[in-house]
Amino acid sequence: MARRSAVDEGPAALDEPWDEEPKARKKQWSGGGGRWWIWVGRALLWTFVLVVIVNGIRAPFERFTAETPSSITSADDGGPKFPQTQASAYALQFAQVYLNYDENSTGGRQEELARFLPEGADAQFGWNGLGQLSAQHIQVLSVDVKDVDDAIVNIAAKAGERWVTLAVPVYAKGGGFVISGEPALLEAPKKAQLPQESGVEHDEELEAQLKTQLVGFFQAYGNSDVVNLQRFTEGDGITGLGSAVNLLEIFEVSAPPGDSGERTVTATVRWKVPPTQPRGTEGQLTQTYELAVVKKDDQWSVRSIRGAVRAGS
């Protein structure tokens, strides 16, 4: 076949192949480079997301594992605790046996003590078998917890003419109890000294008014007089003492100053106490109450009644 001369084709023959080739190369490069940068961006984005997630999980875990053992095993973690109520009842039963003995009947005490003592303990638990001891008014005073298994239950009792405290060591495990050692006699709780009362201001006008108006209330309260209680009280929550006492007099009323229609006052009354025996003598008791009173028109009604704390506190 004869070869055509490039000269014969003219300028178009020379321009056509050179014009098409650069256009194709430019288009191919543009598409391939754009996809590459998109994949790089996605990889960087996912890397950032994974770092955030990992740090979010790791941070609280590190804080938890960094806590001290004492904070993890604190008394508020819901773990085992010494059973104070049950141990108190157990120690109370023991004290009633331990604090009462008589040399004329040693066998009975020994048998009763066996229920509380560990294996191999002295059958009389320290008593030499001589003399007598009688204790009354035995009751739980406090519990000193040592750990989840051990505690000292302090028992108050009147032994002869003196009040004493009996410290009873109790061991608790698996729902069972045992006296884990010899008890110790300690002194009775000391009597506290009240601070001197500071000067207390009084609403003397209200005190005089209440001293008169509260007579009807306390009469109805002592006798559980439902009809009159409704007259002197607000609501129906106060039911009275069921004729256990009768009012003798209102000895004193103390009211703080103020101008509101609601006050908290104290009232000291003297009760007559009927005898419990057919030919017995009537007694008297002086007692102090705290009353919440509410004013309606010119009449004060009692909203609540309870025991009073010391004056000025």
Image (tube, rainbow, N blue to C red):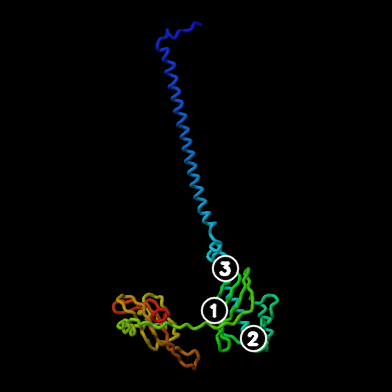
Helix, strand or loop for disc 1: strand
Residue 286: assigned label:
none
Helix, strand or loop for disc 2: strand
Q: Looking at the image, tell me whether mark 3 or mark 1 is earlier in sequence order.
A: 3
Spot occupied by residue 296 in the image (x, y as percentages of width and height): 31, 76
Spot occupied by residue 174 in the image (x, y as percentages of width and height): 63, 68
Give the crowd class for mark 3: few <14, some 14-19, many >=20 residues within 10 Å. Answer: few
Amino acid carrying mark 2 in the image: Tyr
Looking at the rendered image, the quarter that the C terminus falls into is: bottom left
Amino acid carrying mark 1 in the image: Leu
Helix, strand or loop for disc 3: loop
User: Observer-nearest residue: 258 or 262?
Assistant: 258
Q: Is residue 282 above or below residue 70?
A: below
Spot occupied by residue 223 in the image (x, y as percentages of width and height): 42, 84
User: Observer-nearest residue: 284 or 133?
Assistant: 133
Q: Looking at the image, tell me whether mark 2 or mark 3 is earlier in sequence order.
A: 3
Q: Which residue is mark 3?
A: 81
Q: Which residue is mark 1?
A: 141
Marks 3 and 1, how far apart at CA: 20 Å
Spot occupied by residue 30 in the image (x, y as percentages of width and height): 44, 28
Left or right: 42, with 157 as reference point? left
Q: Residue at x 48, y 47 (%)?
A: 52
User: Observer-nearest residue: 304 or 155?
Assistant: 155
Left or right: 275, with 127 as reference point? left
Amino acid carrying mark 3 in the image: Lys
User: Observer-nearest residue: 306 or 198?
Assistant: 198
Q: Which residue is mark 2?
A: 101
Q: Looking at the image, tell me whether mark 1 or mark 2 is earlier in sequence order.
A: 2
Left or right: 300, with 170 as reference point? left
In the rendered image, the residue lying farthest to the top is 2
In the rendered image, the residue lying farthest to the front is 7
